[in-house]
Image: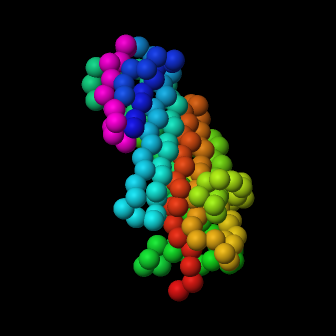
Amino acid sequence: MTTLHRGDRLIGQTGRAGMVYGADPGGWGPYRLHTEATRSVSPLSTRLTVDWTFRSATTGEATALPLLAVRFAPALDDLNRAPAGGPFTLPVYVQHNAGEAVRTLAVQVSYDDGLTWAPTPLVRVGDRWHAALTHPADARFVSLRAQAKDTRGNAVDQTIVRAYALGNS
């Protein structure tokens, strides 16, 4: 499901994840775009939820929206697993359609499919970050949640339940 609001007014909604059509009233305005998807064909990425807030204007031509996406780039084995029972460094970066600088980034981790969350320490290196995780020995999956905001106030809040598996090769 995907919904698009301008201010408090719903202007578009579909039953599909990541796709929405709507009638934009024109001019500058604040927007909220929400999408969610669930899947059962794999034990990984079973639920994805993303909320964007941004300001935009009608231009009369195709224009990229100022949306951010937090990307996780873990070093995994061929079965999409990371080692359980120890420290793990998770590379993180933020993509941005409008090229604005990222002002803030926060990442949380869950080892119980999103029932509880813990903040992760982040170290910035250039335009990327490294999240310091400690994978429990008895956990089976890692879920990730992140919030990012750019210098113009555009923001994203995204959650991936079961982003990757844990195990020992």
The colour scheme used to paint the residues is rainbow
Residue 23: within the magenta?
Answer: yes
Frontmost residue, 111 versus 26: 111
**Residue 41 in picture, x, y percent from top left:** 36, 62
**Left or right for 26, reference 94:** left
Measured along the vertical axis of the image, is residue 143 above or below residue 97?
below
Q: Quadrant of residue 151?
A: top right
Q: Residue at x 42, y 27 (%)?
A: 4
Residue 94 visible in rendering:
no
Residue 148 visible in the current orientation: yes
The picture places residue 84, in percent across and down from the top left corner, at: 63, 77
Does residue 124 show up magenta in the picture? no
Nearest the viewer among 14 and 109 is 14
**Picture coordinates of residue 117, whole percent (x, y):** 68, 53
* Residue 57 as seen in the image, left or right of residue 75: left
In terms of depth relative to the viewer, which is nearer, 63 or 89?
Answer: 89
Name the spot of residue 29 as percent of width and height, x first: 48, 18
Count the numbered circles shown.
Answer: 0
Q: Is residue 119 above or below residue 28?
A: below
Secondary structure character of the magenta stretch overall: loop
Residue occupying the point 34% across, 32% down:
14
Residue 83, quarter of picture:
bottom right
Residue found at x 68% / y 77%: 137
Farthest front residue in view:
40
Residue farthest along the bottom direction in this orientation:
169
Query: To which quarter of the image does residue 112 belong?
Result: bottom right
Q: Foreground: 49 or 6?
A: 49
Question: Is the N terminus in the top left, top right, bottom left or bottom right quadrant?
Answer: top left
Task: Tell me which residue sits at (51%, 61%) in the image.
Answer: 163
In the figure, is residue 20 to the left or right of 165?
A: left
> Does 11 appear above or below 162?
above
> In this picture, which residue range is highlighted in magenta?
14-26
